[in-house]
Every structure is written in structure tokens, then in C-alpha cells.
Image (spheres, rainbow, N blue to C red):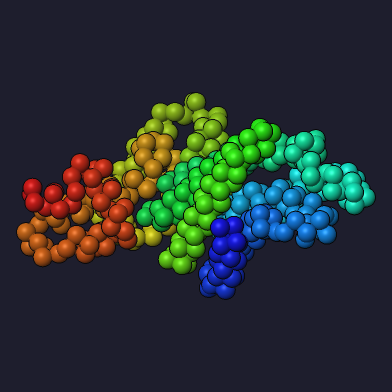
């Protein structure tokens, strides 16, 4: 099973490096992640003779584990944010890997062959490996928190600045992150069994982990083959309304009344423009594009919608789309239009997102609403 996981991983690496895509960095980072993942799994079916002839190589292979999670974190960043680029500061993520190799160089690599054999045969009882596993466990905990914080920021920025986001992006990243970190936390639990003298339990834990790894790896391949252009990044420099507000509200206590009048006026202008010009019919409308059309600075427009109107830009625009769809569904002259044709006409580009938004707004499905009209 481990051999199959490695083979499938290498197959997916080949696919990622050859498929045509705009986000090449993300594909390359995922390929590197899978490569380290495959190297980690190689040890399960390496022969004892090979390991004993190449102890230093085996010790180095162990330390590659310290690169797997950091590379996955960088992959998530590259998928979420189109402006993400690798920089010198990202080398800081290699510190655990470098530290482990420094320790192993002084404590293991220069040992005699007999000492290396003794270390390998009793590795589960020695402090070097125990300390390394503690470090990996701490690394998994920290990066799992970091990854889900990135996804949270991505979702919030998208909702405040874009409409019709490809929800498959967030779902894919959330699903893959959840699956992988479940595997890694199970791996931590499995490693605890190293120090419990129940060999049968340790063997079965390894078998279960190998099956899960194979399932997840095959799932990666199916996703990649079915959705080669799955990802679309956003600008990480975009600010959330809550981050803008403190700066915008400094030194304005004296002009609060005037500000309220300006806000009411801007809301009126915005609603009139949305009703008359119907910019929401553009399925890829962004807050920047609407800002340019209505001639309100994008920062002011973001605060206006997300704070003063208490709506995400995503929900604000989709509300107009749903209202337009409701009028079409009620119109007997347009009864020949299918739900699919209507959702494209009003600015949606996904049936699932249209149905979700429509039910959220009306508590009915589009078909049920049409039948009730």
C-alpha cells in the first residue's frame, strides 16, 4: 500500500508539473509537498539491508518530515493569494529541518557502523528521535492553526470584495487541510504507540495509516484530473472593513453628524445605481470595479457596504441578483426560461451558489418559488 501511495504521488507530481495553468507556483509547491510526502513513505518498504548500508541517507530521510507541513502551508498561501511569491523570509520555515540535521550530524552521522546499528535498533528508546518527534508534533499543531487562519482570512476578503467566488477553491483547501491534518494527528497518536510494548497494536496502526494515506493520495489525483484549473487567487493586500474603520474614524468625533449625512447620501446613490444600471449582471463584478463605476473610493465603498449596511459585498450583490431572478420567475411571459438560463442571466455562474443564495433569501428553491407564484 505504501508503494502504491508513492507511485500515485509521483504520478500526480508529473501531472502537476506538466498541466497548463496560470498558477504555476501553487502546482510546483504542491508537487514538492508530494515529493517530500513520497520520500517519507519510502522508508516503509526499504529493505533492512539497504538501510544498514546507507544509515546516513536514512537519517537524512527522517528529517525531510520537517519540510512537509511548511511546504503545504506555503502551497495554501500560493493558492489563496494570487500575488504570493516565494521570498528569502520563507527560508525561516526550514529552521526545524536544518536544526534536526545539525543535531543528527553531530550525534549520528559520525558514529561508527556498530554505533549506528545500535542506534537504529534502539531508536524508539533514544532521546534524539523522541525529541525529533516532539518537535514534529509541535510543528503540526502550529501549522494546522496557521493554515486555517489563512483560509479564514481568504474567505473574509473574498466575501467583502468579490461576487460569485469559486467556492470550490475554499472547499478544496478546507477539505484537503482537514484530511491531511487528521492524518498527521493520527500519526502523532500512532507514534505514541512506539513507546507502548504492544507490538500488534503498533502493526495494525501502521496498516490503518497506510490505507488512509493511499485513500487521501488517490483523492488528490482524482481532484487534480477533474479540476486542473481549480484555483483562483485573490490580492492579499486587500483590507477588511474592520481593519480600515479605526483609521477612517480617527479625529472625526466633531463631524459625526456630517459623516452620517454623507453615509446616508452614499447609500442612496449606491442603491439607485444598482437598481438603474444593474452592474450585478456582471458575474465577475468586484468591489474595485463597482468603485470605479460609481466613483466612490474603494475603501469608502468597502466600509459603506460591510460596516454601515452590515452586509458582505458578496451578499449585497447577490441580493440584487436574487431579486432580479424572482421577478423573472414570477413573469408569465418568461415561463419558458429554465432555472439554469435565469441564473446565468442575473449574474450567477454556478447552479449550487444560485440555489444556496436563493433559498437563503426566500426560504424556497427557485422551482418552488416559481410554482408558488
Task: Report the label total.
Answer: 0
Instruction: Tell me where residue 335 sits by quadrant.
Output: bottom left
Question: Seen in the image, is 246 located left or right of residue 137?
Answer: left
Q: Residue at x 34, y 45 (%)?
A: 315
Question: Seen in the image, is 120 located left or right of residue 362?
Answer: right
Q: Residue at x 58, y 65 (%)?
A: 7
Q: Compare residues 132 and 197 and report the one nearer the observer.
A: 197
Q: Compare residues 10 and 305 and report the one nearer the observer.
A: 10
Q: Is residue 143 above or below residue 254?
A: below
Task: Residue 288: give x, y in percent of width and height.
Answer: 45, 54
Q: Compare residues 46 and 263 and report the one nearer the observer.
A: 46
Residue 232 appears in the picture as rendered:
no
Q: Residue at x 38, y 46 (%)?
A: 313
Task: Residue 350: give x, y in percent of width and height.
Answer: 31, 59
Q: Is residue 317 above or below residue 22?
A: above
Q: Is residue 135 above or below residue 105?
A: above
Question: Seen in the image, is 171 located left or right of residue 243?
Answer: left
Task: Residue 341: give x, y in percent of width and height.
Answer: 21, 64
Task: Residue 59: give x, y in percent of width and height.
Answer: 79, 51
Q: Compare residues 324 and 266 and report the one nearer the observer.
A: 324
Residue 204 appears in the picture as rendered:
yes
Amino acid at each position: 500500500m505504501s508503494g502504491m501511495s508513492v507511485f500515485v504521488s509521483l504520478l500526480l507530481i508529473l501531472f502537476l508539473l506538466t498541466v497548463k495553468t496560470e498558477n504555476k507556483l501553487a502546482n510546483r509547491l504542491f508537487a514538492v509537498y508530494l515529493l517530500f510526502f513520497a520520500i517519507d513513505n519510502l522508508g516503509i518498504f526499504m529493505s533492512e539491508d539497504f538501510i544498514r548500508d546507507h544509515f546516513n541517507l536514512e537519517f537524512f530521510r527522517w528529517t525531510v518530515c520537517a519540510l512537509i507541513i511548511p511546504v503545504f502551508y506555503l502551497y495554501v498561501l500560493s493558492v489563496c493569494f494570487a500575488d504570493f511569491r516565494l521570498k528569502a523570509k520563507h527560508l525561516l520555515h526550514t529552521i526545524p529541518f536544518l536544526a534536526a540535521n545539525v543535531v543528527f550530524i553531530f550525534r549520528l552521522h559520525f558514529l561508527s557502523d556498530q554505533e549506528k546499528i545500535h542506534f537504529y535498533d534502539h531508536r524508539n528508546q533514544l532521546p534524539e528521535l523522541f525529541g525529533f518527534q516532539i518537535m514534529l508534533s509541535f510543528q503540526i499543531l502550529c501549522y494546522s492553526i496557521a493554515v486555517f487562519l489563512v483560509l479564514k482570512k481568504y474567505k473574509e476578503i473574498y466575501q467583502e470584495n468579490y461576487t460569485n467566488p469559486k467556492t470550490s477553491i475554499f472547499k478544496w483547501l478546507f477539505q484537503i487541510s482537514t484530511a491531511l491534518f487528521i492524518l498527521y494527528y493520527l500519526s502523532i497518536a500512532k507514534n505514541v504507540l512506539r513507546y507502548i510494548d504492544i507490538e500488534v497494536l503498533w502493526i495494525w496502526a501502521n496498516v490503518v495509516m497506510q490505507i488512509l494515506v493511499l485513500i487521501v493520495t488517490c483523492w488528490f489525483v482524482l481532484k487534480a484530473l477533474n479540476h486542473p484549473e481549480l484555483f483562483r487567487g485573490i490580492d492579499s493586500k486587500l483590507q477588511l472593513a474592520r481593519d480600515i474603520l479605526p483609521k477612517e474614524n480617527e479625529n472625526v468625533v466633531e463631524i459625526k453628524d456630517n459623516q452620517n449625512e454623507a453615509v446616508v447620501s452614499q447609500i442612496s446613490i449606491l442603491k439607485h445605481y444598482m437598481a438603474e444600471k444593474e452592474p450585478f449582471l456582471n458575474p465577475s463584478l468586484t468591489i474595485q470595479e463597482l468603485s470605479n463605476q460609481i466613483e466612490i473610493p474603494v475603501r469608502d465603498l468597502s466600509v459603506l457596504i460591510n460596516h454601515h449596511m452590515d452586509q458582505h459585498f458578496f451578499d449585497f450583490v447577490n441580493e440584487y441578483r436574487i431579486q432580479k431572478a424572482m421577478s423573472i420567475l414570477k413573469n408569465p411571459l418568461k415561463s419558458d426560461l429554465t432555472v439554469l438560463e435565469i441564473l446565468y442571466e442575473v449574474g450567477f455562474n454556478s447552479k449550487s451558489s444560485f440555489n444556496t443564495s436563493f433559498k437563503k433569501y426566500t426560504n424556497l428553491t427557485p422551482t418552488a418559488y416559481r410554482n408558488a407564484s
